Amino acid sequence: EQAVSTAQRILALLDSDRMKIEAMGRRGASAQRVFEYAQTHPILSLAATAEQTGLSFPTVSAVVGDLQKAGILREITGKQRRRLFVY
């Protein structure tokens, strides 16, 4: 029962986050690519995300900022450079 409950909560979280991304407007497509990457790599760096998604570093940086504001990603290093984010 606990596993089913956990799976349901995860699916609800994914749906909720997906709806937030759909409301982002013009950056929504890029945000969706970063979001999909974050689902399989819950701890991510900007450089690795840019490389793996095929998006430019500035685009990934802007999208990650948007995802932070939406409460989807959280920065965990407290640094200015080589930051890591967690989903």
Image (cartoon, helix red, strand yellow):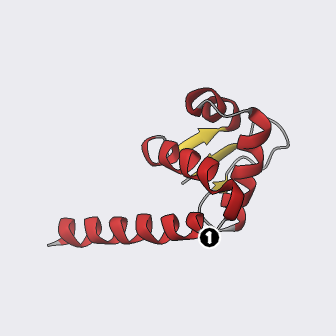
Residue named by callout 1:
23
Q: Farthest residue toward the right?
A: 80
Q: Quadrant of the N terminus?
A: bottom left
Side (left or right) of 69 relative to 7 = right
What kind of residue is marked 1? Ala
Q: Position of residue 24 (x, y in %)?
A: 66, 65
Task: Tell me residue 42's x, y (percent).
Answer: 50, 46
Which residue does the image show at 63% across and 67% down from the upper left?
71
Residue 39, how many percent across, how many down? 45, 48
Helix, strand or loop at mark 1 = loop
Residue shown at the point (36%, 65%) measured from the top left: 10
Residue 56 on image: x %, y %: 73, 32
In terms of image quadrants, where is residue 12?
bottom left
Q: In the displayed orientation, state which residue is furthest to the top.
A: 51
- Residue sitting at 27 percent across and 65 percent down? 7
Q: Nearer the viewer, residue 14 or 56?
A: 56
Of residues 12 and 5, the one nearer the viewer is 12
Most extreme residue toward the left is 1
Q: Determine whether 54 is above or below 61 in the image.
A: above
Location of residue 70 (image quadrant) = bottom right
Q: Quadrant of the C terminus?
A: bottom right
Along the horizontal axis of the image, is 2 left or right of 15? left
Q: At 80% from the left edge and 38% from the top edge, which residue is drawn?
A: 58
Q: Residue furthest front?
A: 26
Q: How many marks?
A: 1
Image vertical order of residue 63 relative to residue 45, above or below: below
Q: Is residue 73 above or below residue 1?
A: above
Q: How many neighbours does mark 1 have within 10 angstroms: few (below 14), some (14-19), or many (20 or more)?
A: few
